[in-house]
Image (spheres, grey):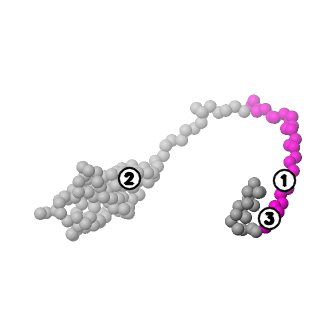
Amino acid sequence: MRKIFEFLLRLFGFIKKPIKLVPTPKPSIKPTPPPSSTPKPKPSSSIKPTPSSSRPIPSPTPSPLFCKDVAVLNKVTLISGSLFEYDFTPGEGCVAVYLQYTRDPELLNWVTFPKPVSCDSPQQLDVEITMGTIYFAIATDCFVNLSPSNVVSYTFPE
């Protein structure tokens, strides 16, 4: 291996004359003494496992990670142009809501406002649509997942 290394260094012009490589001393290895024949302690026979039926089972407590109720979208009102106001009743355990809308609810192509808003109602959103029918919903953020609300529609006058 040393000769290959020296050859490569010469090949690429890093050295002009031979290098004297000094081997590093190997550490001395001492034999490990055989394991002692010390007896291992045996488990005490006075300790017995507790039967699982005697352990108290804690009763489940409500967790803030799940919504107890889904929010209800009461109505949507056109404020002006394409600005709408969502009037809703948040569910118990609500952390935040996402405002949603779509032109075709059958396609499940809902536009969700990227930032959650507080659970305080009402909330406003500019949907940038000014004709046809728009379908609105809100999704409640319950830490674990989004819980959808009912759907309310609005049709612009022709």
Q: Which mark is residue 146?
A: 2
Pointer 1: residues within 10 angstroms few (<14), some, or many (20+)?
few
Kindly report the secondary structure that dominates the magenta region of the rendered protein.
Answer: loop
Q: Mark 1 highlights which residue? A: 26
Q: Is residue 61 left or right of residue 49?
A: left
**In the image, is 41 to the left or to the right of 98?**
right
Dot 3, crowdedness within 10 Å: few (<14), some or many (≥20)? few
Q: Is residue 23 left or right of residue 127?
A: right
Q: Which mark is residue 54?
A: none
- Residue named by callout 3: 18
Q: Secondary structure at mark 1?
A: loop
| Secondary element at tag 2 | strand
Q: Are marks 1 and 2 in contact (CB under 8 Å)?
A: no
Disc 3 residue type? Pro
**Which segment is the magenta one?**
17-46
Q: Amino acid at mark 1?
A: Lys
Residue at image coords 70%, 68%: 13
In the rendered view, does 119 fall on the left or right side of 74? right
**Rendered location of residue 84, percent (x, y):** 25, 65
